[in-house]
Image: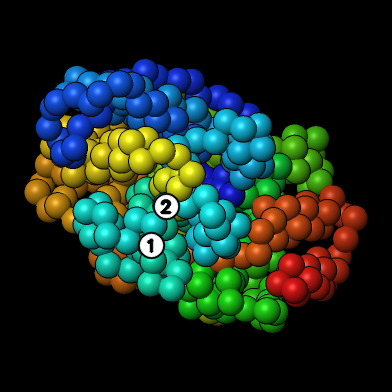
Amino acid sequence: MKNVKRILAMSLMTVVGASVLVGCGNDSSTGGGSSKGKVEVSIFQYKVEQKDAFEKAAKEYEKSHDGVSIDIKTVGGGDDYGSALKAQFQSGSEPTIYNIGGPQDVQDWTGKLEDLTNDDLTKQAVDNTLGAVTVDGKVYGYPLTLEGYGFIYNKAIFEKAGIDPSKIVTFADLESAVKTLDSKKKELGLDSVFCLPAKEQWVIGLHTSNLAFANEFASGTDAFNAKEIEFKYADQLKKILDIQADYGLQPDGKKSSVNGVDYSTQVEKEFSLGKVAMIQQGNWVYGSIAGIDEELAKNIGMLPIPVDGVSEGKLPVGVPMYWGVNSNKSDDEKKAAKDFLNWLYTSDEGKKIIIEDCGFIPAYKGYDSDALQPTDPLAKTVSKYAAEGNTLPWVFMGYPTGFGETQLGAGIQSYFAGEKTWDEVVKQAREDWKTDRQ
């Protein structure tokens, strides 16, 4: 995730990653050898949590490949990746490899994406992971990973409060547990029950809203093809937002102040320090939590977010982003780019990094051995729900450009600030979607 589509979440960003030089250049995906001259491959990616892991992968790749330099820039977390990527292209510094979301991004980047249909890595993708980047039978992206999100909770706090997380299925169950936690805040050492980072429009405008729209559309592609939205589960979405804001961290004691809470405050300052019981996030935050308190990280779980009376016991699971290859680059550069990504996901060395360092849930075949299974509790939970089919689609990948993380996200912030009623937010969202699709 992190975040997410222009996401993941995943959008508006500053460069927090740095570069790594690596050697490469080889016709095979895993073998050695060298190429004539120097090939430079630039990667512009949004996964802040995996920045170090990707740089490690680049270094490992250098050991068996000569002649290629790989420069990795990371832009993510609370910043706008989509805007940063556009700025990168406009500056004339077009990356060789970059992240794209679903069908909307494929359309937006038409003419800048290599056809990957017949590539070996494409053929290794697990079922139902390529639809969002397939147009007229052609595939334009490699899946990055599988991810899921929900309410991540502190098991020790729940146990001390006498709450059994397995009993939280319906919205009424959630509400009861939240009130119990709130009544015991002092003895539990909590600042609040939740911490909603409403400053991050990708959280509220994409991930939270997806809970409603995943019950209106069957897939991101269906959402992409929709000219209008009914927003039939707007009231249920309001309940999910309100319970997090009303029982969440309010820096100045007012609901409006949740708009000033960012991702870092939520994950690193509040949850990782045991100051809140629950946060809405995904399995991508495990590394950040473990980096602050490894023992706490081992004692956390994830609950589905119940959409009142509609969908309960289901986690939203999907491909957060894809790797796109810039079709305007030279043949040598594109070949080296594809080779690196193929190595990362299919070689023994690469697979180890994907599982152990990235903490990814693989979106590719060839990870059946026990040594290549997810190891952290959040990834294990997502894998379990995915295997059982208890999932909701990530339809926000098919939202119109800017709808979720700017238009709807801003509308929700206005609601929290008391500047708009919820009905006004819903009406505006319907109008924005219709206008965006024209």
Secondary element at image label 2: loop
Give the x, y percent position of residue 289. 43, 32
Residue 339 on image: x %, y %:
26, 39
Which quadrant holds the C terminus? Answer: bottom right
> In the image shown, does 220 or 121 lie closer to the viewer?
121
Earlier along the polypeptide chain: callout 1 or callout 2?
Answer: 2
Which residue shows up at 44% across the image and 33% down it? 43
Name of the residue lying farthest toward the front? 36
Q: Position of residue 169 (x, y in %)?
A: 45, 68
Residue 378 location (% of width, % of height): 35, 47
Q: Residue at x 10, y 47 (%)?
A: 370
Residue at the limit of the structure toward the left, as seen here: 369
Q: Amino acid at mark 2?
A: Glu
- Disc 1 marks a residue whose amino acid type is Val
Name which quarter of the figure residue 67 lies in: top left
Work out how far the residue at label 1 is from the one at label 2, CA to CA, in angstroms: 9 Å
Dot label at residue 114 = 2
Query: In terms of secondary structure, where does tag 1 sit?
Result: strand
| Above-or-below relation of 405 to 52 | below
Question: Mark 1 = which residue?
Answer: 139
Task: Say which residue appears at 88% left-offset and 60% top-offset.
Answer: 420
